[in-house]
Image (cartoon, rainbow, N blue to C red):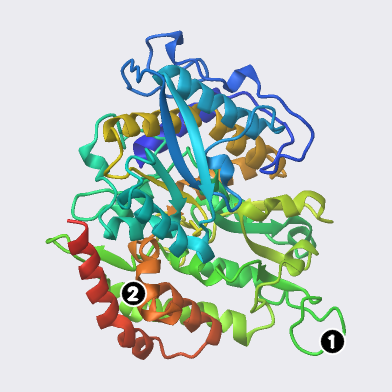
């Protein structure tokens, strides 16, 4: 992780300030990609390109014009894979250029097929992959890009390659996600990965907004500086939000029209607090077998749940249900959001900043940001025509994205359009560097298919915060055996 942060820091120091208005959607006014972020790997023999971005170590490869087929999911994240020429935005133009560069470097022609594959369609997506791969559709796809929960299911079905067995993939490079690789690896094997290649990875990160007008109104210190100082903690957030709750709409109870210290967009919000703690919900033993951790099963999680649930249910300062109108209306000091919703802030009636969720305890070393479920992981079917060729294409696409489409999105959109000032740009680096994922989330669908939502680690944790039942120890004890058995089976199925 340190090596990657240093590489990213070098890049940021060498970049010129860029302010271009663009967004994930392609319906804004046309905006071409500046030559300053285009990639020219052949420009020199140095390790870095002219903009300070690390180049990959791929040799010169020629796959003879091969028609390279990618399967993706079409529920809002087509631009992880392919866009048509002239789609409009700087990000789309960079994606188009990225794929054309990959085609030129490797002498291939990329074709992309999209089918529904989000949370509600993941079972059909997996069934399609299995049936296509093993029921007469031999060599149908060379690369699979799927909704995050699908990768674990495909791995347990034994139909995708161990990426560590393949040539050309270099997971030490900064375009791969360290945290996801660490938590996805099972028994020394890795079946799916992601990184700069997927715009959805950035959009799926969860973090906080801060209403700078309210901050000034209440004479509070800027929490973004606390992040830099390492002193931004849950206790500090509770202190800052205390007494902010106020009746504004003359309606009984806590309503969306009142003022709050903290409110949030999404039902995923409880997961953000588990992520903020940095706690592992599961881990491998010395035999490479996954099981739930003592931290998750015990007092550490119980204390976290009690802390958050008390704030949401027993004070007037935190809103206790998702409602984006509280945040967008300017009635919340802090708002829990994800990258996917930042377009909503284009016309808010207040000045805002961004920052990671706080450290749960003062002795925590880092800040952690939940990586939600709606992002793409990439895998290679084990009946692909040439798995090593697929690996070369995946490495090349990810590497080119790191130098072109990812800067277009992260530097130009998030750090410029979705920022109020220069300190926000620094906050996005903290948010991205602390991306949190856990094996129980990666394999969530495997648990849910057998035990239902409330029989999963994520489901039972959300329920404990939302209901404020105070019965964590007994609740988690009820699922421990089932989950540990399933984790053991998952470990066995991927060996």
Residue at x 32%, y 88% (from the top left corner): 478
Q: Is residue 133 above or below residue 119?
A: above
> Is 398 positioned to the left or the right of 214 in the image?
left
Instruction: Note whether residue 211 is visible.
Output: yes
Residue most extreme to the left: 287
Q: Residue at image x 29%, y 76%?
A: 483
Where is mark 1, residue-wise?
251
Q: Where is 393 relative to 124, above or below? A: above
Extreme front residue here?
136
Tag 2 residue:
296
Which x, y percent locates residue 128? 42, 55
Looking at the image, the residue that sits furthest to the right is: 250
* Quadrant of image for the C terminus: bottom left
Front-lying residue, 145 or 349: 145
Identified at 74% across, 84% down, the residue is 254
First of labels 1, 2 by sequence position: 1
For image coordinates 52% across by 68% down, the residue present is 234
Q: Is residue 287 left or right of residue 433?
A: left
**157 or 76: nearer the viewer:** 157
Pointer 1 with pointer 2, Cβ within 8 A = no
Foreground pick, 95 / 212: 95
């Amino acid at each position: 992780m340190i090596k990657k942060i240093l590489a990213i820091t070098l890049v940021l120091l060498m970049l010129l300030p860029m302010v271009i208005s663009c967004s994930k959607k392609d319906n804004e006014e046309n905006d071409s990609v500046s030559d300053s972020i285009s990639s020219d790997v052949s420009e020199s023999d140095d390790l870095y390109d002219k903009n300070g971005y690390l180049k990959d170590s791929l040799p010169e490869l020629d796959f003879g014009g091969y028609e390279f087929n990618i399967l993706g999911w079409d529920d809002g994240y087509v631009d992880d894979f392919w866009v048509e020429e002239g789609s409009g935005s700087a990000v789309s133009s960079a994606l188009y250029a990225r794929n054309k560069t990959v085609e030129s470097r490797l002498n291939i022609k990329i074709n992309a097929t999209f089918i529904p594959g989000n949370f509600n369609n993941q079972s059909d997506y997996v069934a399609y992959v299995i049936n296509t791969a093993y029921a007469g559709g031999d060599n149908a796809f060379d690369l699979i890009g799927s909704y995050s929960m699908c990768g674990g299911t495909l791995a347990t079905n034994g139909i995708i390659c161990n990426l560590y067995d393949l040539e050309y993939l270099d997971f030490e490079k900064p375009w791969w996600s360290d945290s996801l690789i660490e938590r996805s690896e099972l028994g020394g094997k890795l079946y799916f990965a992601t990184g700069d290649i997927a715009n959805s990875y950035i959009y799926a990160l969860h973090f906080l907004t801060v209403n700078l007008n309210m901050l000034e109104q209440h004479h509070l210190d800027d929490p973004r500086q606390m992040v830099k100082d390492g002193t931004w903690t849950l206790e500090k957030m509770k202190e800052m939000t205390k007494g902010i709750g106020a009746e504004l709409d003359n309606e009984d109870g806590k309503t969306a029209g009142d003022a709050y210290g903290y409110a949030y967009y999404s039902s995923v919000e409880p997961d953000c607090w588990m992520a903020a703690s940095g706690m592992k919900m599961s881990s491998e033993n010395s035999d490479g077998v996954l099981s739930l951790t003592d931290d998750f099963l015990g007092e550490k999680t119980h204390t976290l749940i009690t802390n958050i649930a008390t704030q949401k249910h027993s004070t007037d300062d935190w809103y206790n249900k998702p409602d984006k109108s509280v945040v967008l209306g300017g009635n919340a000091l802090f708002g829990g959001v994800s990258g996917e919703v930042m377009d909503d802030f284009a016309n808010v009636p207040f000045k805002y900043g961004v920052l990671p969720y706080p450290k749960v305890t003062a002795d925590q070393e880092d800040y952690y940001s939940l990586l939600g479920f709606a992002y793409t992981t990439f895998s290679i079917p084990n009946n692909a025509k040439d798995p090593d060729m697929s690996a070369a294409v995946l490495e090349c696409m990810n590497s080119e994205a790191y130098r072109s489409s990812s800067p277009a999105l992260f530097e130009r959109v998030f750090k410029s359009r979705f920022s109020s000032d220069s300190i926000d740009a620094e906050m996005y680096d903290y948010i991205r560097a602390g991306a949190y994922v856990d094996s129980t989330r990666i394999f969530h669908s495997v648990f849910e298919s057998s035990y239902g939502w409330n029989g999963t680690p994520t489901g039972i944790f959300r329920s404990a915060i939302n209901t404020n039942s105070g019965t964590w120890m007994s609740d988690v004890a009820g699922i421990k055996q089932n989950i540990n058995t399933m984790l053991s089976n998952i470990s066995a199925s991927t060996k």
